[in-house]
Image (tube, rainbow, N blue to C red):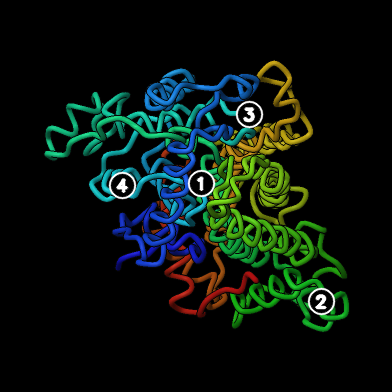
Amino acid sequence: MTVYLDGNHLNLDDFMSVVRNDETVKLTDEAITRVKASRQTINDIVEKGKTVYGINTGFGKLSDVVINKNELSKLQENLLKSHACGVGEPFTEEITRGIMLLRINALAKGYSGVRLITLNQLLLYLNSGILPIIPEKGSLGASGDLAPLSHMALPLIGLGEVYYNGTRMNTNEALKIVNIEPLNGLHAKEGLSLINGTQVMTAVGAVTTYDAIQLSKTLDIAGSLTLEALYGIIDAMDPRVHEIRGHKGQVLTAKNIRTLTKGSEYITRQGEKRVQDAYSLRCMPQVHGASKDSLEYVKSKIEIEMNAATDNPLVFNQNAVISGGNFHGQPVALCFDFLKIALSEMANISERRIERLVNPQLNEGLPAFLVSKSGVNSGFMIMQYSAASLVSENKVLAHPASVDSIPSSANQEDHVSMGTIAARGARDILNHARTVIAIELLAGAQAIDLHKASNILGKGTLEAYKKIRTVVSFVEEDQIMYPFIEQVETIIKNEQLLNDVENVVGHLDMF
């Protein structure tokens, strides 16, 4: 598969095929034409000596400083050097590919004025696996992701560091291995065009959103298995209940649970064992569904931003080079804070079901902490501790980053989005939520075994149970538990568990 970029039609699935599966990327002919036309406008401005921000002026508060024509290339190189102030651990190679892909797509729109050779160099690096070392921290989210994108751009002119074949090395060392020459400098506006945008926050948020969508389906699987382990009441999933409220995520979650538990002999009806279930069981459609609706909204905004022109100034034609503020990350910063809340709630309700499974006062006669001879064995007691710790940490991380702003550039940039902080927070909460859901799946499978019943599981939950048991055996007595969590996390993360279930019941519904 080859993903063609024209600046207008990139979607989340194609984005992930490049980021996660290393698909090849090419520009469309239309994009090439637009890039050339945009560059010609910049060349004309330089030749005429017209003063335009970012082309022949300083940057930020220094925008009133006019730069001599013979120093324009030095200006762009200095911009990258001075702005490469990122700190912290580097982004993963997966995220780095996403950053590069999104910056290529933004430049392919033809509103930035870069030379085609510069855009092709970035494309060549992506397709060749030459991935810049980009520190995670240091962006305010306006004027875009200046610091991390500077780290992305430095290798184009042979500076900075990169990963190649998983090894960190000097850029020129990697270029010698693949026999590629760096660019011989940058021309007017090119440095600014490479770094003025929201592609770092958007890449992090996009990968997180894709994984959150898959995790939301896995949450339905985990909740359904717990419902069976606790002899839950299926009447609460009746479609009539959810259709009269009308929220799509709620309706689809109830449908998923009915699909997953179809044929189960563990689920009960109203009045058979009790009149009502606790909210963490009965309200799965309402809670899981609200997160689904949130994810649908976030995905829609991310796909807009993936195809957005976020440069400054923007080159429209020979008579219109306009300095605006499309680099400001606020439209997606708010989304990523929303994403943090949606993911936190997914973990919150999962942890409450873990508590019901391990608590002998709540778990339908199962042994305390899901282990025989409790006392000498602690069983799953501290599994719930770990889940509780993660959901508590999520509550801190879920505080909105976008409500903060610190003025910069001598107060010229006096309101910023903090969108990259929001995106990184969402990624961290996603990782915690995945762990919590892995613990719920472990506890649910353990509970089913402890019932020692001949009851039949649901069509979908049976496949989930079987998959869990391929990596983790029944816990007869206390063992070192953390590898079990990691093993189930792995089959969630690589979508093996979800794929096995969907191969049997069909695709679970999200949107």
| Residue 204 vertical placement versus 70 (above, below) | below
**Amino acid type for the residue under numbered disc 3:** Leu
Q: Counting other residues with Cα less than 10 Å from the Cα at mark 1, is it few (<14), some (14-19), or many (20 or more)?
A: many
**Disc 1 from disc 4: Cα separation:** 14 Å
**In the image, residue 251 lies at what x, y percent?**
75, 75
**Disc 3 from disc 2: Cα separation:** 42 Å
Q: Mark 3: which secondary structure?
A: loop
Disc number lying in front (3 or 2) = 3
Badge 1 or badge 4: first in the primary sequence: 4
**In the image, residue 451 lies at what x, y percent?**
59, 62
Q: Given contact means CB atoms under 8 Å apart, are the residues at marks 1 and 4 in contact?
A: no
Question: Quadrant of the rendered structure where residue 266 is?
Answer: bottom right
The residue beneath circle 1 is 203
Badge 2 or badge 4: first in the primary sequence: 4
The residue beneath circle 2 is 242
The residue beneath circle 3 is 140
**Disc 1 from disc 2: Cα separation:** 35 Å
- Residue 479 seen in this snapshot: no
| Residue 12 vertical placement versus 336 (above, below) | below
Badge 3 or badge 4: first in the primary sequence: 4
